[in-house]
Image (cartoon, grey):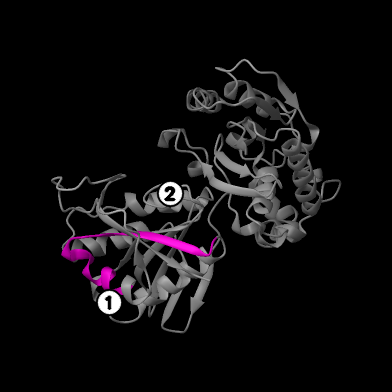
Amino acid sequence: MLRIYFVRHAEAMGNVQEFFQGRTDCEISERGAKQLEYLAEWFRDVPIERIYSSPLKRTISTAEAVNRHHGLPITEDERLIEIDGGVWEGKPWAELPLLYPVEYDLWQNRMEDFYIENGEKMTEVFDRMKAAVTDIAAQNQGRTIAVVSHGCALRNYLCHAMGRSISALKDVGWSDNTAVSLVEYGDDLTPKIIFKNSNEHLPAEMSTLSRSKWSRIEDTVYSDDGTIRVRNLRLSDPEIFAREEVAQGWQNASPEKLEMRIHDSAAGKAIAIAADFEGEPAGYVSVYPFCMNGAFGGMGYPEIVDFNVLEKFRRKGVGTRLMDVAEQIAAEFSDTVYLGVGLHSGYGAAQRLYIKRGYIFDGSGVWYGDKVCPPYAECVNDDDLNLYLSKKLK
């Protein structure tokens, strides 16, 4: 079994000043240096045996941090370099829609067709990264290694590792600076993503992606019948839902929970969606395609989390529509999906809905937080007390 940890470089000056960085060889920023401290500590006990890196300064600095507690040689590979931005190189992101409206529209909406004058086609990046990693994998069967590269380059490879064609590139999502993905390979070198774009080693204040103006979440509509519209969770939603939840008696409701879902969605770790009923925000749910938590964590199954419909919109089909879309999204990644449900009466409607939809209990018993409760143990019946269920989608 081969395990490859893919790492995006630390924050560099192009990320701070928000210009198209591409092949421009920028130094890491002050925050980037701090990110590398957290990254080095995260990799301290990971038994990596080889390290490969793009040759640019920001990736070499990141590879050196990965290597801090290992003392390995770092192999530079030109094929791991970032997309060549051609005439976009060094230009502020804010100017690109004005100077290159056609190309910018491709970048935002049809990435697979993107090409810029004097630059590299997106299809070339996809093929280059696929070939580079396949070669590296073939040379390292049975090892655990690290590959350090760039945002666009890694987005292309992870699209391939998900088993998708380049036309699905827009669905992969951007990773934060120093985000880590883990992919495993069997004897035939078929990739299996274990987790993707994790920035959990970074404190919230160290995140670059959460500060970025250009990496906004694109507006996506998944379903619309004229009454119920399912679309991506928006930046304005957390305050709206928190206010409504307080009004219905949830005194501890706050926007932070959904702000975290939006952040995870922007980082490519989740797909966070919401439903409007006759134009009013009515409910929300998120799908984590490569989850490491709970009864099925690390098995390659997506998890549906944080499902809620405001009380005034219940029994109107909102919950069913949200779950329909969530399961459709999950089915793009696996034939099985799982979720956890609380045990107290506040989860009664969700419990009934899951059983009606064909979910079955996994048999591992009651969980509290991230651990199974031993038989006869005393547990507090709060939101952290859960049972796990799964469903076959295909």
Q: Indicate the quadrant containing the N terminus: top left, top right, bottom left or bottom right.
A: top right
Eyeballing the image, is 310 above or below 235?
below
Eyeballing the image, is 222 above or below 234?
below
| Image location (x, y in percent) of residue 118 | 86, 46
Q: In the orientation shown, which residue stands out farthest toward the top?
A: 71
Q: Kindly identify the amino acid type of the residue bearing the numbered disc 1.
A: Arg
| Image location (x, y in percent) of residue 218 | 56, 60
Q: Is-magenta flag for residue 127? A: no
Q: Kindly identify the amino acid type of the residue bearing the numbered disc 2.
A: Gly
Residue that label 1 marks: 314
Residue ID at (64%, 42%): 151
Q: Are marks 2 and 1 in contact (CB under 8 Å)?
A: no
Residue that label 2 marks: 297
Q: Which of the two residues, 46 or 94, is positioned nearer the viewer here? A: 46
Eyeballing the image, is 213 above or below 140?
below
**Judging from the image, what secondary structure is the residue with disc 1 in?**
loop
| Image location (x, y in percent) of residue 373 | 23, 46
29 lies left or right of 230? right
